[in-house]
Image (cartoon, rainbow, N blue to C red):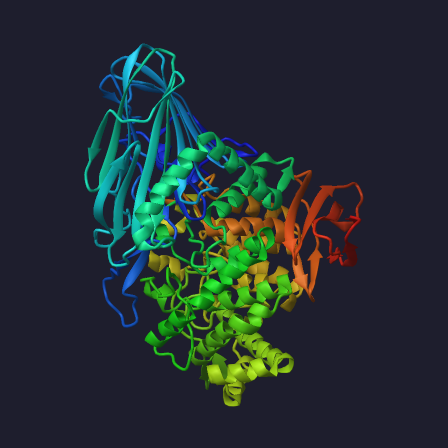
Amino acid sequence: MKDKYIKEDPWSIIQEGWNPKRVKSSESLFSIGNGFFGQRANFEETYTGDAFQGSYIGGVYYPDKTRVGWWKNGYPEYFAKVLNAPNWIGIRVISDGKEVDLHTATKIENYRLELNMQEGWLERSFTIYLADDNILDIRSTRFISLEVNEVGAIKYSITSKAKDCKLTLIPYVDAEVSNHDSNWDDAFWSFHGSESYDNKAIVLTSTNKTNFDVATMMCAEIHLNDETLTTPTKINKTDTKVEHVYDVRVFKDNPVTLIKYGGYVSSFHQEKNNINTYAKSILDKCESIGYHSLLESQKKRWADIWEISDIEIEGDISAQQGIRYNIFQLNQTYNGEDARLNIGPKGFTGEKYGGSTYWDTEAYCLPFYMATKDQEVALNLLKYRHNQLPQAIENAAKLGFSDGAALYPMVTMNGEECHNEWEITFEEIHRNAAIAYAIYNYTRYTNDSSYLHNQGIEVLLAIARFWVQRSQYSQDKKQWVILGVTGPNEYENNINNNWYTNYMTRWCMTYTLGTLSTIKSENLFRFIKLQKELAWTDDEAERMKAVTSNMYLPYSEEHQVFLQQDGFLDKELSPVDALDPSQRPINQHWSWDRILRSCYIKQADTLQGFYFMPDDFSKEELERHFDFYEPMTVHESSLSPCIHSILACRIDRLDKAYDLYLRTSRLDLDDYNHEVDEGCHITSMAGTWLSIVEGFGGMMIKDGLLHLNPQIPKQWSSYNFKIRYRGQVLKISISKTNAEAYNYTNTFVELIKGNTPVEVVLFGKKITVGSTSSNQ
């Protein structure tokens, strides 16, 4: 059941009306970031109610010691967690001795929260009635700068509505923070003192164990009656906290405004001995630029982002808001400027999943960044995995694999496996396939094989070596099998012959062998070098061919479908519609034992393979498998609805596709799974983009050409999207038409950036898009 309280608007996320039960959910939904750091939409002023304070710095993490009931050989020693960073946004507000606190206020009126996605800022306003009979109008505008990566800015205005009063404004930096998800309540931070000078302050900290140094900084100034106050009345300072106290006498209806800059400089990006000096230079730079110029720069930067990444939908404001929210959060989370960073499932919106990298990046996120950013951005995501290949080989070695076999981690910050649930750590090995698939996907989309033939082949071969060793020959079946795994559907653990895992294993080895063959024919010198460096032999090639040619894929003759795994038909097959709605989601109502014995599927599993490899299956086969598996899928993974939406489009089930699109695009906005207070589902948001571009838009790369087969839901009058494709930018516009050709759509493809004509296959007909646009 949806939990809908966000006002529908094409460019903003808006909450109207105060409700303390919404605080943590709104903290997630209204989160802001710039790819380098981000934060939940916590209040600047004191709030003693139930809240989830959270600010996070990209790349800065803590190795929280693994906590399990029974230690098993091969367990990771720690779970890497992005740290709740020191709080730089804090502003205490005291009116005639009474502190502003929405939790204890006499009354709150006119509460409004807006996240403007078009321009990249967050604004909160309200009227608060205090115990001293004073009434304050407060408005806060905040953004995290795309111009200066290390800082955010706040404009905090207060107007006394009932009387003249004394306001005490206390901007502060506070390093006494903790993570909500600590395993052992360890101290994650050490404190190294603070400094206050002029109107500025810096608190110096470092992470325990990982030894990241962080300077948390602030600069504040008060504006009253065209006068600027930059000297605090008083300074309160400890090793962990600095407060600047400003006492201001204000008249009724006469606003006072506090401008505050703050943020982080860390040793992830700066030399340790330069952090304090650099932080000071950043504060000076912000003062020099000024709040209004910094905000104008923010608006321009976001305008540039939207110019390429925006998707416009006419006739359906709910769908429009949903896709823009997803695109906005993806751009806040990752910008591709640093190959050491990646996309955490919660981004900067919460702590669940540790903020680490999962297979989501390769399976869902890469296409979005390939098509909306410069090619280097997607390439950095591939480099991230190549740079961590030594750790992937080490991870495999810990589990008993040898000779250069690599098992990439399910969860990681630096390449080491750090997930501590056994069914994930040891069994969900299909993550290797997603990393191999990403290399293939990048190569076919960009038509650039340089990465594949250099770094990529090293990754592919290491993964293929793992698959060869992980497979075993069944004397009973006379085929190669893979036992004891968990597929994408995590509602099945420790199963044999998960179809998706086996199928992608076979594909991966085939793709690796084909790539090696191509390198040998096109660049014999490179091939000989690879043979020497990677100890690649003809015997190993023959073993790999033997496995690929005879891999077992479970199949039901009765149902004419590939089976999700061995024994799936032993279950009582029942559609989701038969479930009591009060039992949904089942992961919040059923025991794990009951879930494992049920037929219900958390997310696309067999159908994930059909999505990845559409050319391998006919439309009729897809339809048969969709009709078999989709009714049993509960979509309790955020990664599930988007895949089913795309597949529904491929079999012309537009009503189903639309319903699933709304679910993926508004998963967090409408809180379908009743968990948005923990943070948003960032990586699945890339799937929302896919559901429009690859689903309704029908975009696919086949035989080296861009194919488009657009359809349009009945709820929309038109939509359009843009893609960067092989150095050019195309705009694809789809609208309804009375003509009964081309699935009742009128499609217009135009080249809007670049001067190289592009061959496109539109509804099966090859056209050239160049100086003149093309219609169908």
Q: Which residue is rendered at x = 55% and y = 48% of the image?
A: 688
Say whether residue 616 is visible: yes
Whether 49 is drawn above or below 106: the answer is: below
Q: Foreground residue, 381 or 543?
A: 381
Question: x, y (%) of residue 360?
Answer: 47, 58
Image check: 118 left or right of 65? right
Question: x, y (%) of residue 460?
Answer: 51, 73
Say whether residue 430 is visible: no
Q: Foreground residue, 272 or 666?
A: 272
Examine the image and state in which quarter residue 609 appears.
bottom right
Examine the image and state in which quarter residue 3 appears.
top left
Q: Which residue is rendered at x = 63% and y = 61% of the image?
A: 445
Q: Residue furthest left?
A: 238
Count of marks placed on residues? 0
Image check: 48 left or right of 139? left
Q: Which residue is rendered at x = 41% and y = 36% of the image?
A: 286
Question: x, y (%) of residue 643?
Answer: 55, 55
Q: Name the quarter where the N terminus is drawn.
A: top left
Image check: 747 left or right of 535? right
Whether 618 is drawn above or below 236: the answer is: below
Question: x, y (%) of residue 426?
Answer: 36, 69
